[in-house]
Image (cartoon, grey):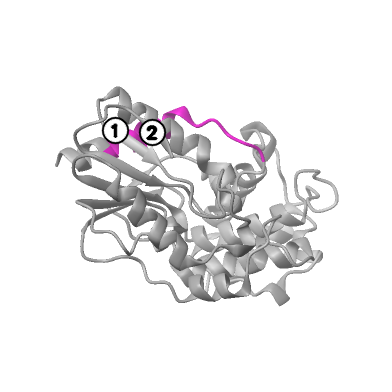
Amino acid sequence: MVPEGMNAVEATVRDVLRDVLSLPQAQVDGFSADTELFGTLPELDSMAVAGVLTELEDRLGIVIEDDEVDGEMLETFGALTRFAAERALV
Amino acid sequence: MLRLGPDHGPTILALPALFEEANRSRTLLVAMLRRLADRGIAGAIPDLPGQGDSLLPTRQARLSMWRDAVAAAATTLAGPVHLVALRGAALAATAIDPASCWYLSPLTGEEQVRELRRLRIAGAGDDYAGNIIADAMIDDLAHAPLPDGARTRVVRLAGDPRLADNHLPGAPPWRAAEPVAAPALADALAQDIAAWIAG
């Protein structure tokens, strides 16, 4: 089942960051909308970004075009969740 | 070729995921085959040309070589051969006629190429996460069909909503930034394979 609803999308983004960046559950549980990601989280390098995007596509059943990807949508956990939700919840 | 378990009876021909994903998921694959060997089921993991411990430079690999190598590996195995393929490896298994096929999180050639292109863009070089891959190989993969015909089972991980015969809990090691030991996942996958082969 593809996750539906904002809470389900947020939970999926949390799981994807945990699984792709090999972060402890407690760390991703502590993520809030303001938590800074790209540039702050050392695990999130450009290769890891590629893995995060592809895994989000798989789990949410969405397609992310590479020209949609910019620093802004990766800046915070809230921004990444909004970006995913705009595509997953239509 | 890494061989595990007895030298008779049904044998699993296990193909690792492709390119960078192979490094990240090899531990899981070996753990799965060890558990199957403990149950008396033999397994073999070949190195496809240009992958793993193969002496061929990755840039010289072509899909036809992989298919020939898989076929050659299959002829060296005793008993009925059951194919196990992780991720895109199934694309290399169209030149054999196994007793059954078991795929973990398979993807189409087109999807595999899309992932590779994304890695190349992320690395901002000509390589794909450290792998030099010929344009001809990318083209081969982009048009490669998944094998059909044999008795087939598809297993995916719980977070993956796509159609499958079974969804098992666990994180995908082929995506993980750090090598992950996933003993519970290896147990569950080995159990699924053992039941499938026995069925």
Separation (CA) of disc 1 from disc 2: 8 Å
Is B189 in the magenta? yes
Q: Where residue A48 appears, x then y in whole percent? A: 70, 52
Q: Residues within 10 Å of mark 2 (few under 14, many from 20)?
A: some
- Residue in the picture at 70% in, 65% down: B120
Residue B42 disc label? 1
- Tags 1 and 2 in contact by the CB under 8 Å rule? yes
User: Measured along the vertical axis of the image, is residue B124 above or below residue B16?
Assistant: below
Q: Secondary structure at mark 2?
A: strand
Q: Where residue B45 appears, x then y in whole percent? A: 41, 41
Q: Where residue B24 appears, x then y in whole percent? A: 58, 43
Q: Where residue A33 appears, x then y in whole percent? A: 73, 52
User: Measured along the vertical axis of the image, is residue A41 above or below residue A75?
Assistant: above
**Chain under label 2?**
B
Q: Quadrant of residue A52?
A: bottom right
**Chain under label 1?**
B
- Residue in the picture at 28% in, 39% down: B192
Q: Quadrant of residue B145?
A: bottom left
User: Measured along the vertical axis of the image, is residue B34 above or below residue B177?
Assistant: above
Which residues are the magenta region? B178-193
Residue B3 disc label? 2
Residue in the foreground of this view, choosing between B187 and B77: B77
Query: Label 2 amino acid?
Result: Arg
Mark 1 / mark 2, whichever is N-terminal = 2
